Image (spheres, grey):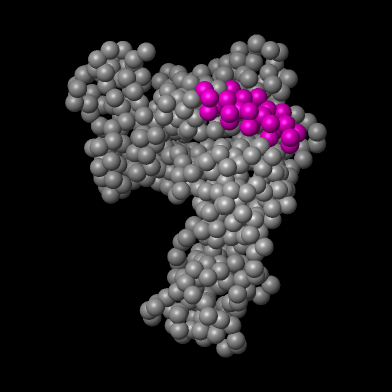
Amino acid sequence: MKDHELRLRALGIDTRREHVIYMRRDCHVCRSEGFEAQARVAVNLGDQSIIATLNVVNSELLAIGEASLSTGAWRALGAAQGDRITVLHAPTLDSLSAMRSKIYGHRLDARAFNAIIGDVASGRYSDLHIAAFLSACAGGRMSLEETIDLTRAMVDVGDRIDWGGVTVADKHCVGGLPGNRTTPIVVAIVAAAGLIMPKTSSRAITSPAGTADVMETLTRVDLDVPAMRRVVDREGGCFVWGGAMPLSPADDVLIRVERPLDLDSDAQLVASVLSKKIAAGATHAVIDIPVGPTAKVRSEEDAHRLQNLLEQVAQANGLKLRVLRTRGSQPVGRGIGPALEAHDVLAVLRGAAAAPVDLRMRSLVLAGELLEFCGHSIPGKGRSEATRLLDSGIAWEKFQSICEAQGGMRVPGIAPIREPVITEHSGFVSDIDSRRLARVAKLVGAPGALTAGLQLHVKLGDSVQRGSPLFTLHAETTGELAYAKHYLATHPFVTLGEAVAT
């Protein structure tokens, strides 16, 4: 065996998208190069190369002369069992000095952000480096100019779609309001009106479900750019996971690390949202900012600050933007979790009698606003046009056509374990804590378990009698159900009062 060469053995270790290499401490490469655990190394196979984090093995899991890779690294190299790889020290990253400068509170220029984001998108940063960068940019440490530069860097590092100069609609919610799954309904209405709306969406960051998670229960969402173009050319709209295409590719890397940190700063949120819109070719976008005591944005002051940041960064990047502040005092719809939210979406689109009224109304407001903003409807008439397209069934037909064009439509599943949570008292629902609710839904398995989550049976102001169900937990395993119930025992998210909530 040649110097620096090791034979690959598959161990099937999933580290999500982080590239990890596993090597014996006593292997000739570790000894000769002085590698230690957590070292960043260059792994080469033929003309393919990646940067990976070293995990050291002190057992017979690997034989002398063998190494293994995480499943993501294995796929990135196109490796096969028994392939021979070479492992060397990773090249020095000049951008780390800029990242350290930001940690110490210094402002970065466009060149620094370009270097950092370029290295992030190319897989040269470890998760530790990314977490440090995200933390350094959180807590109000980013100026307007830095946020603009970060957004541009995230756009420039990936591809950008050009739709030929036509008006291209987009819509986004900043999050923090469980069940607010308006996007699939808005896309169906807007595309049914004849506008172009190529919707790219992220998976959940801090919530129990993102739009991509929900739509994945209904159709294929991992389309590449050519497939996305074919769907949009045929139907006018699409529902695509942004991580499946090279549009602002650094965003999905950052999101993967943000998720376990439960971190979503204003600057990173703005750069993430707007870079995706710009890269996808949007010309007009409506942004929904729910405001509520337990939403992501808790006060009008916070909403005003975020709105100003969104508007200024959008303007600097040539994107026309309209921001709507909406009520965020309680969850939207009944289902919380990918499949449960998908069932709510289908109920609204089909015009079912039991469809959640709040989800329907919020979708109509946003769709109407977008129709007016894009010049399809005259001011004041957008909502009535959106209502006509929804109530006539035209939007439902368009939704089905888009799903079929993306690979076929399927029925979302139902969790095998369902357990209602019963109230021990009578009263009126005076408060629903959205953050605690989201935590319960995640503990019970969402969004990783697509059918997991919870179904709400009450809204603010509802009168409930002792022994009636407040919500039903949906789980795919008994262990996850137990986790959620243990948390609920000390962190209830529904509060009952003696008077009607105002």
Residue at image point 67% right, 29% down: 311
Name the residue furthest top: 380
User: Front-most of 290 and 476?
Assistant: 290
User: Front-most of 99 and 271?
Assistant: 99
Q: Is residue 122 above or below residue 322?
A: below
Q: Is residue 281 above or below residue 500?
A: below
Residue at image point 71% right, 13% down: 378
Percent coordinates x, y for residue 440 in the rendering: 34, 38
Quadrant where the N terminus is found in the figure? bottom right
Percent coordinates x, y for residue 323 in the rendering: 62, 25
Q: Which residues are magenta?
A: 300-324
Q: Is residue 176 above or below residue 393?
A: below
- Specify whether residue 410 is in view: no
Percent coordinates x, y for residue 225 in the rendering: 69, 47
Answer left or right for 340 relative to 388.
Answer: left
For residue 231, what is the image quadrant?
Answer: top right
Residue 492 belongs to magenta span: no
Quadrant where the C terminus is found in the figure? top left
Answer left or right for 389 relative to 413.
Answer: right
- Specify whether residue 143 is in view: yes
User: Front-most of 219 and 109?
Assistant: 109
